[in-house]
Image (cartoon, rainbow, N blue to C red):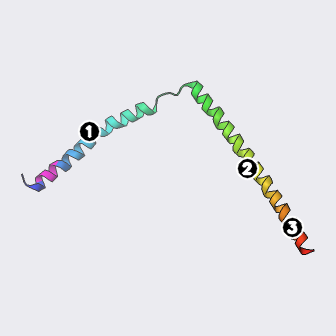
């Protein structure tokens, strides 16, 4: 068989197997994806998420306070250097 024929058969085999296996792979992915997570685990994750969001909000507030303090200190130093 000439090399062109082998290349054609290989290409045809790859395309054919892709067409045939795609629905099977998609069904397997749906089956894996649809597994229900235990309600306790879901609730625990929600609590952890809320805790993290609260900590991030607190950190943002503290960073804002620190920024205000730095601004205040810079103004004081600027006044002091002018006099």
Q: Earlier in the sequence, mark 1 or mark 3?
A: 1
Q: Which residue is depicted at the point 58% across and 29% down?
A: 42
Q: Secondary structure at mark 1?
A: helix
Mark 3: secondary structure = helix
In x, y percent, where is residue 43?
62, 28
Spot occupied by residue 14 in the image (x, y as percentages of width and height): 23, 46
The magenta region covers 5-9
* Residue 65: % across, % down: 80, 53
Q: Residue at x 73, y 47 (%)?
A: 59
Label 2 vs label 1: CA separation? 53 Å
Q: Which residue is mark 3?
A: 77
- State the residue at coordinates (13%, 51%): 6
Quarter of the view holding residue 20: top left
**From the viewer's perspective, is residue 79 above or below residue 13?**
below
Assess disc 3: are there few (<14), some (14-19) or many (≥20) residues with their C-alpha within 10 Å of its C-alpha. few
Query: Which mark, residue 20?
Result: 1
The reply to whether the C-beta atoms of the residues labelled 2 and 1 are less than 8 Å apart is no
Tell me, yes or no, whether the two marked residues, 1 and 3, touch with CB atoms within 8 Å.
no
In the rendered structure, which disc, 2 or 1, sits on the residue that comes first in sequence?
Answer: 1
Residue assigned mark 2: 60
Q: Is residue 8 magenta?
A: yes
Q: CA distance from mark 2 to mark 3?
A: 26 Å
Task: Using the image, determine if residue 71 lies above or below residue 13.
Answer: below
Judging from the image, what secondary structure is the residue with disc 2 in? helix
Between 59 and 57, the one lying in front of the other is: 59
Question: In terms of sequence position, does the residue under pointer 2 or pointer 3 come before the other?
Answer: 2
- Which residue appears farthest toward the left when viewing the image? 1
């Amino acid at each position: 068989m000439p090399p062109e024929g082998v290349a054609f058969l290989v290409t045809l085999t790859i395309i054919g197997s892709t067409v045939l296996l795609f629905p099977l792979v998609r069904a397997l992915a749906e089956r894996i994806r649809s597994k229900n997570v235990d309600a306790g685990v879901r609730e625990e994750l929600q609590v952890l998420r809320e805790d993290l969001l609260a900590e991030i909000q607190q950190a943002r507030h503290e960073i804002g306070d620190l920024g205000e303090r730095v601004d205040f200190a810079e103004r004081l130093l600027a006044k002091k250097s002018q006099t």
